[in-house]
Image (cartoon, grey):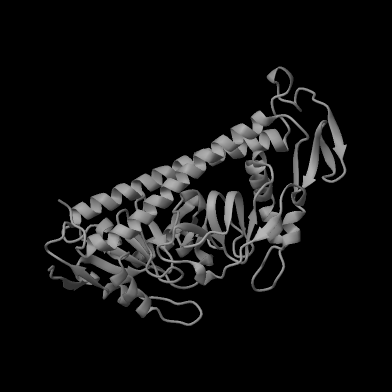
Amino acid sequence: MKTFKYQKIEDLVSRVKVGFVGPISNFYCTSNDGVPLIRTTDLDDINLDKLKFVTNEFHKKNRKSQVKPGDLIVARHGDNGAATIFDKNYEAQVLNAVIIEPNPKKLSSYLLKIFLEIPFVIKQIKGSVKGSVQGVINTKHIAELLLPICDNINYGGIENLIYSIDKKIKINNLIIDELNSTVKTLYDYWFVQFNFPGALGKAYKDSGGRMVWNEKVKKEIPAEWDCFYLKDLLLVLTGKEDANFATENGNYPFFTCSENISYCDKYAFDGKAILLSGNGNFNIKLYEGKFNAYQRTYVLIPSNADHYTLVYHAVKNRIKSLSNGSRGSVIKFITKGDIEDITVILPKSGHKDLFHILNTLTKKIELTMLQNQKLSHMRNWVLPMLMNGQITFK
């Protein structure tokens, strides 16, 4: 039987502090004249090109909210307690989040992040959240979180294993981004600019291919092509389940309006599908196989599988305009009619090679995403048991 001793985070790290709290717009500046600012909304992807910047004077004055490489940034609101290691090679400012400066002699940044993901600690975090509208966890609560530590557990082995899984997921995400970029480029070139390979392999439109006026889209499209409404190519369906349908160890993906994919025990759909959230951020996903869906998730399964990737990008191209014109003052939403009236331009016949190339690349994306889902599932399953000693390393 393993014996645990419980230690506060503040006793295992160098410092726990809070990022700047308060109005900050007066301190914004250009990237050339300032220091990056990390907000809670940036924690999932700290990308220098997307960050706002604050003045150098603000940075020097507010030392408490400075973050340096190796520090841990913990969300105070939103996904309370979600931690990100700041692994960049520059200093930055943090807005309204907790910063933990690790003590490598006691606990590495990565191992501390792992501790924050185990059920025992998550339960403490949820119990500390204050506020009915937007729950917030404060610096003191983070500092006083108890970590269960056992001398007989190989934490170095756990850290190496989880790091390897996370690194593979990160590499896969880079592969997915590159493949998505390639598919998007080909789609735009072939189906938007109409420079698909024509006679002698030359770009159709640029080499003088015959174009004709199409009244539906109010522009010229290639001769022998046509414009279809989405309702002409598929049925627009919706899921039937509520949010409580998800289960902890379900066998089938359960698509809701969230970016994240849940799981459930029963499937209702099977095939190549485009999943579109009807509210929230209107995210769109591709999936092939058995799955189920939430009531406000639209399910699009093309009648012709060749059109799979094409329909996905046609819908994705319209997401921004659809969301800008969506209805509702509090929860914006997209209607079934909005989706059915999306236009798709494609050849009346032939050009199967174009569809095949797009679908082959999309299949590679899906397989890589599936691998990430399985890795995440395995990680979430094995981590608590490793940390409480149910599973050990030889």
Residue 251 x %, y %? 44, 58
Q: Is residue 178 above or below residue 91?
A: above
Residue 32 x %, y %? 49, 49
Q: Is residue 64 left or right of residue 317?
A: left
Q: Is residue 382 above or below residue 327?
A: above
Residue drawn at x 29%, y 71% is 121
Specify the quadrant of the image occupied by residue 45: bottom left
Kindly tell me whether residue 55 is visible in this rendering.
no
Residue 277 x %, y %? 61, 60
Residue drawn at x 82%, y 45% is 217
Q: Is residue 38 left or right of residue 127?
A: right
Q: Is residue 266 above or below residue 209?
A: below
Q: Nearer the viewer, residue 66 or 16?
A: 16
Q: Nearer the viewer, residue 23 or 311?
A: 311
Kindly tell me whether residue 224 is visible in this rendering.
yes
Q: Nearer the viewer, residue 134 or 317?
A: 317
Residue drawn at x 71%, y 17% is 200
Residue 242 x %, y %? 56, 70
Residue drawn at x 34%, y 54% is 378
| Image quarter hosting the N terminus | bottom left
* Numbered-mark total: 0
